[in-house]
Amino acid sequence: MTLFENWGDYWWPGQYEECLRNILHDTTTGGREIHDPDELERIERRLTTIRAAQLIHDPAHVDQTFTPGHYHALHRWLFQDVYEWAGLPRVVTTLKGDSRFADPEDIDRLLALVHENLGDPARFQRVPRGEFLDALTRTFTGLLMIHPHLEGNGRTSRLYLQQIAARAGYQIEWTQVPAPVLVDATIDAFRLEPDALQHILRNIVHPLHDTDPAEHLRQRMREMPPPGTPAPHAPPMQPPQQPGGGAHPTSTGAPTTTAAPRTTLSDSEPAPSRRPRETVGARRSRAAPRGGRIPGEASYRAQRTVNPRAQPATQVQHSPPAPHAASRSAHAQSPVQPARSAA
């Protein structure tokens, strides 16, 4: 087993800060070592996606104790096929752009503080949704600032927040937010400006019964009245009134009643469109800044431009044709007579 004591131990010999040392030759490639960082990233994404799907299908793979050990165990499960140090806190100080993460000696203490503030997520089943969103935002921000592992903190944190939400009775739809938007929001949260991140969570965190058809059906059955309960009678509808008063007459002269249109969810407000599925991943941490901010940060803040060629359509007002003299005389004699066409 490799001993990880300094920054150089995480990289292949001769590939310092180029390709991370990995164990794919033992787990995946049949003995072929992976020294290409692009190939490493592709295989890593595929394997961690498979592991995440396995965990979602059977959460018993990792004990959900909601402690620092739980968070490390999630990381170990996701990256067990890729890195020898999976699940172990990093032993080096890392930065990303101009953001410096927690020092290695402070990781355990700060993780314990984040979980102490969170408590048992089940308690949020009995409080308003806004209180849970506040706690979820604080937890996510704390994990971002600590950055416990060298690689894979974003994927681990999102999966961890999904388990927290499930214990609290909620579901997080990460695929509803594009990757650049989430990256920019996490950068702002790291700088103690969590409003954008909380806004995103407010839009993608939903009660479980909204996404679980079986639970939704059980909720509907609980709301049904007991057998034998008489159905409530709706009040009789009044016929609509004309502007001058009275009901609308029919061709036979008898008044009729017009039923009011039913208002459905699609009539009252448009259903939110599902965003394309995009995988949100954290870029590899570096020991020193390598210039600039994280790609995608500026693109989200770009202002919308207006096409100068796009001019509003000019509305042409058509004047009614002048009636014929004979028509005017006919109208004068009989106001209700239909207008004649001009010769």
Image (cartoon, helix red, strand yellow):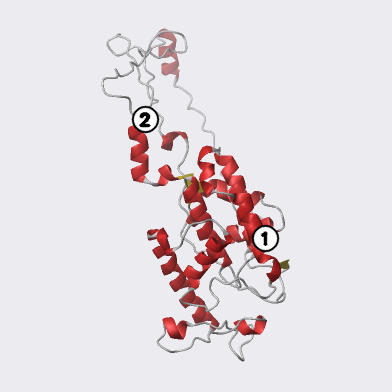
Residue 44 seen anywhere in this rendered image of the structure:
yes
Q: Give the distance between the C-alpha atoms of the residues marked 2 and 1, in whole angstroms.
A: 44 Å
Quarter of the figure with residue 27: bottom left
**The C terminus, quarter of image:** top left
Q: Residue at x 35, y 32 (%)?
A: 222
Relative to 171, is 75 above or below? Answer: below
Quarter of the figure with residue 30: bottom left
Left or right of 78 on screen, residue 58: left
Residue 300 seen anywhere in this rendered image of the structure:
no
Relative to 243, is 133 above or below? Answer: below
Q: Residue at x 49, y 81 (%)?
A: 39
**Residue that badge 1 annotates:** 110
Q: Which of label 2 and label 1 is nearer to you?
A: 1
Give the farthest residue toward the bottom: 14
Place of residue 169 in the rendered image (x, y in percent of width and height, measured from the top left): 47, 45
Place of residue 146 in the rendered image (x, y in percent of width and height, measured from the top left): 66, 63
Comparing 176 with 143, the one in front is 143
Looking at the rendered structure, the kind of residue marked 1 is: Leu
- State the SS at label 1: helix
Looking at the rendered structure, the kind of residue marked 2 is: Glu
Q: Residue at x 65, y 81 (%)?
A: 5
Q: Which mark is residue 214?
A: none
Left or right of 223 on screen, residue 95: right
- State the SS at label 2: helix
Quarter of the figure with residue 85: bottom right
**Residue that badge 2 annotates:** 223
Relative to 252, is 196 above or below? Answer: below
Comparing 291 with 238, the one in front is 291
Place of residue 2 in the rendered image (x, y in percent of width and height, measured from the top left): 56, 85
